Amino acid sequence: MALTKILAVDDEPFNLEIIEEILEDLDFELRLANSGPECLDMVEDYMPQVILLDVSMPKMSGYEVCKTLKLNPSTAHIIVMFVSARGTVEERMEGYSAGAEDYIVKPFGHDELRSKLKNLNQVLVEKQSLEKQVEAATSTAFNAMANSSEMGQIVNYVESIALITNPDDLAKALIDCLQSFDLQSNVEFRYDSIVKHYALHGVCSPIVIELFEMLKNKGRLHEFSQRLLVNYELISLLILNMPGHDPDKHGRIRDHVCFIVSVTEQQLRAIITKNLLDAQQVKLNAVASTVHSKFHGLIDLLNENRLNNEQVFKKLQEELEVRIPTMGLDEDQEIFIYKKVDETIQNSVAREESVIQVKEAFADIETELSILLNHSQ
């Protein structure tokens, strides 16, 4: 388990008692602080992995504490979960702008807090396992794009994603492309009743996922602090570190990002369409195979009936040739019997010609199916 040390910060002792009670039987080391300054005094010595930070405190608000933690290289990696009595979109966005990874609204129950800590534990596990891979990937991406212009990077990206046939690979390519602009990003894909999240470090924090859900139908662009959220029908993208010191570069990068997301959405649609067509092709092949099997089964049955008829008429002719001369019939009666037998045989021949026509029709249908299958592939 990655999460072992937690620091809870609240100016109300009763709230700290509630957190202690919820976490007392879990394998966490829990320490408490009664104010923002006390939290900052003890955090570097204790070095918790998660801080449960009250928003509304005297002297120093939770937002101020969080910003101070995130500006300090020694504590910037610590996960902050804001604890607040209010949970509007604006307050969550302010919390995220301050650097928090999650947000829980008072009053909360045992299961809600434990569930959020379980999710944060998974974030820590993923970060630890992917940290070295991310560093290597970051180095490779920057080296590869070091000598390319911004438009050159975009052209390379557009050309490369045309060959991608898997949504997960497309999301990774998008994140890598943005990383080549020195942009850290989180991505949400929505397709076929599936919602998937991707981030530079493997997983999106819970507060990012909440922002995607709250804002996906609220317009194309949202900018707050150095964050940029871009919404399309199938894709939402959150940039964490838009350039703030250069307004011209900020506007140019924003335009690049919108274009890149638009192109990515079109490729995602193409992948979905191809997957649908491939599935339909499989079904069509199965139907053609079934029709082929049924046709040949029916033809075999018709051939069997024809052979049986031939045997019956042959046996009848043989019996008549033996029996009629011994039956004492006059010539007219013998002629009548032979005539009826001939008519029956002729009718059978006519039916055989119909069978041949049926076979030819089946052959034509199979030919048409074969052409259809070849054209659809």
Image: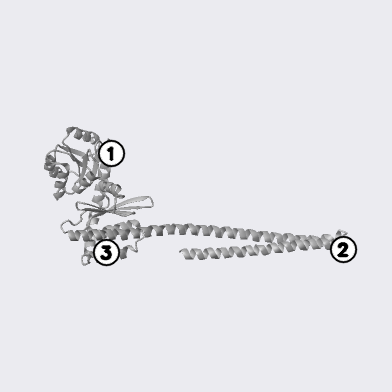
Residue 284 lies, in percent from the top left, at: 49, 58
Q: CA distance from mark 1 to mark 2?
A: 106 Å
- Residue underneath mark 2: 331
Which residue is label 3 attached to? 154
Give percent across and percent down for residue 76: 17, 49
- Tell me the kind of residue under disc 1: Glu
Residue 181 visible in rendering? no
Check disc 1 and report the residue beneath it: 112
Label 2 neighbourhood size at 10 Å, few (<14), some (14-19), many (20+)?
few
- The reply, left or right, for residue 332 in relation to residue 99 is right
Quote the CA–CA distance across marks 3 and 2: 101 Å
For marks 3 and 2, the one nearer the N-term is 3
In this orientation, which residue lies closer to the viewer: 27 or 11?
11
Would you identify the image quadrant in which residue 17 lies?
top left
Here the colouring is one colour
Compared with 235, 372 (above or below) is below
